């Protein structure tokens, strides 16, 4: 084997315990996803229900012939 392809073992290996690990990035990512979900839910509410009735129920009544 060539010396370029051989892998050296690191001299110092650091292990992290549960107390030392702080998943701030994961919490921020989950927060961003939740914020997007809430904003899309609010947008859906204004588009779907504000100013006109629920379109699924409105369409169902029209198809059945009740409206």
Image (cartoon, rainbow, N blue to C red):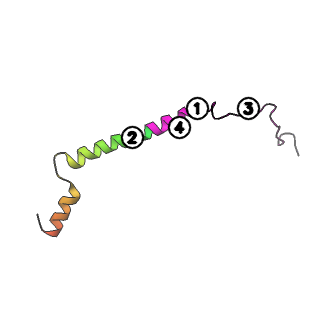
Instruction: Find numbered disc 2 in the image and state the secondary structure of the residue it sits on.
Output: helix
Q: Nearer the viewer, mark 2 or mark 1?
A: 1
Q: CA distance from mark 4 to mark 1?
A: 9 Å
Residue 23 picture quarter: top right
**Residue 28 is a magenta residue:** yes
Q: Is residue 26 above or below residue 48?
A: above
Where is mark 2, residue-wise? 36
Closer-to-camera residue (44/1): 44
Q: Position of residue 4 (x, y in %)?
A: 83, 40
Q: Position of residue 50 (x, y in %)?
A: 19, 45
**Marks 2 and 1, the one that precedes in the sequence:** 1
With 20 as the anchor, is 13 left or right in this view? right
Instruction: Find numbered disc 1 in the image and state the secondary structure of the residue it sits on.
Output: loop
Q: Residues within 10 Å of mark 3 (few under 14, many from 20)?
A: few
Residue at (26%, 45%) from the top-left corner?
A: 45
Q: Nearer the viewer, mark 2 or mark 3?
A: 3
Residue at (24%, 46%) from the top-left corner?
A: 47
Instruction: Find numbered disc 3 in the image and state the secondary structure of the residue it sits on.
Output: loop
Where is mark 1, residue-wise? 22
Where is mark 4, residue-wise? 26
Where is mark 3, residue-wise? 14
The span picked out in magenta is 4-31
**Marks 2 and 4, the one that precedes in the sequence:** 4
Residue at (54%, 32%) from the top-left corner?
A: 24
Q: CA distance from mark 1 to mark 3?
A: 15 Å
Image quadrant holding the C terminus, namely bottom left
**Marks 1 and 3, the one that precedes in the sequence:** 3
């Amino acid at each position: 084997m060539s010396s370029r392809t051989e892998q050296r073992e690191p001299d110092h290996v650091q292990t992290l315990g549960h107390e030392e690990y702080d998943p701030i990035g994961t919490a921020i990512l989950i927060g961003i996803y939740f914020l997007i979900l809430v904003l899309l839910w609010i947008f859906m509410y204004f588009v779907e229900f504000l100013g006109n009735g629920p379109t699924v129920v409105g369409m169902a009544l029209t198809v059945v012939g009740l409206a």
